[in-house]
Amino acid sequence: MSSSPSTPGKYNIKELVLQSRSGAAIDVTRFVANLVIYESIFEKTMSGRIGLVESLNLKRHFGLNGDEHVRINFETEGFDGKGVNVVLQSYKNSKTSTLNDTTSMYSIFLDSPIIYTNKKNRVVEAFDENGAKIIDIIFNRYLDAGDANLKLWLGAPVFNKIKFISPYWRPLEVIDWVSKRCMNAPPTSAPSYLFFQTADGFFFTNIADLITKEPVATYTQYQ
């Protein structure tokens, strides 16, 4: 793909690299048939899917087994020509469809890497802190935020403290529980805080703060 995208949903893939746990890496950009990256303020993590059409039998020779790190650099409208960098983790490969004697097609399904650290860890700890401080502690202590690709941005200040003991919950369960109890400053004091991931990192802020931000881009969708 060489031309710039002109409509929503169009993109140019600059680089798409699969890296195995052993450290072996391969650039599969030329094999990509389709790419879907999904992010939402109502989802804690990003997800995605890659469709590959290739004749190298990567599943066998590269050893694709559904636990590779996937580094994606692409461009799309709304980012002023700057590439978007995303690092995700594969968790499943679809069945392979044979197109001819040499060419096969399949999909690789993607999640955020913190899904896997979240599954491994449990939180048994007492808290009596500002809600945003608790979120920051959980993220940095239990979700491997030392990774350069994992950054947490705290937005609108939280007004209240929260006192509780986490009963052997996973980190994202604690974050969800705390988020629902964080309050805006008076007079509204509404519980409208969200924890979510975008290509720029992880964010914890409230809806009131989000709607005051300057738009990055505006799209008009026609059926």
Image (cartoon, rainbow, N blue to C red):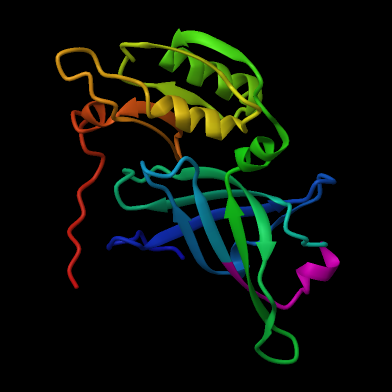
Q: Residue 4: x percent and y percent? A: 35, 59
Q: Is residue 186 left or right of residue 179?
A: left
Regarding residue 147, the answer to whether it shows in the image is no
Q: Looking at this view, is 112 or 83 the one in front?
A: 112
Q: Looking at this view, is 120 or 68 the one in front?
A: 120
Image point (37%, 24%), residue name: 181
Q: Residue 34: x percent and y percent? A: 50, 68
Q: Relative to 147, does residue 1 appear above or below in the rendering?
A: below
Residue 211 picture quarter = top left
Q: Is residue 79 magenta?
A: no
Q: Relative to 64, does residue 77 appear above or below in the rendering?
A: above
Image point (46%, 32%), residue name: 176
Q: Relative to 9, does residue 55 appear above or below in the rendering?
A: below
Q: Residue 106: x percent and y percent? A: 64, 74
Q: Is residue 191 left or right of residue 176?
A: left
Q: Looking at this view, is 135 or 178 the one in front?
A: 178
Q: Relative to 129, does residue 194 appear above or below in the rendering?
A: below
Q: Looking at this view, is 160 or 97 the one in front?
A: 160
Q: Residue 161: x percent and y percent? A: 40, 10
Image point (52%, 26%), residue name: 151
Q: How many marks?
A: 0
Residue 193 picture quarter = top left
Residue 148 picture quarter = top right
Q: Is residue 56 magenta?
A: yes
Q: For the magenta stretch, what is the residue range? A: 51-62
Q: The C terminus appears in which quarter of the rendering?
A: bottom left
The outermost residue toward the left is 187
Regarding residue 206, the answer to whether it shows in the image is yes
Q: Is residue 132 left or right of residue 101?
A: left
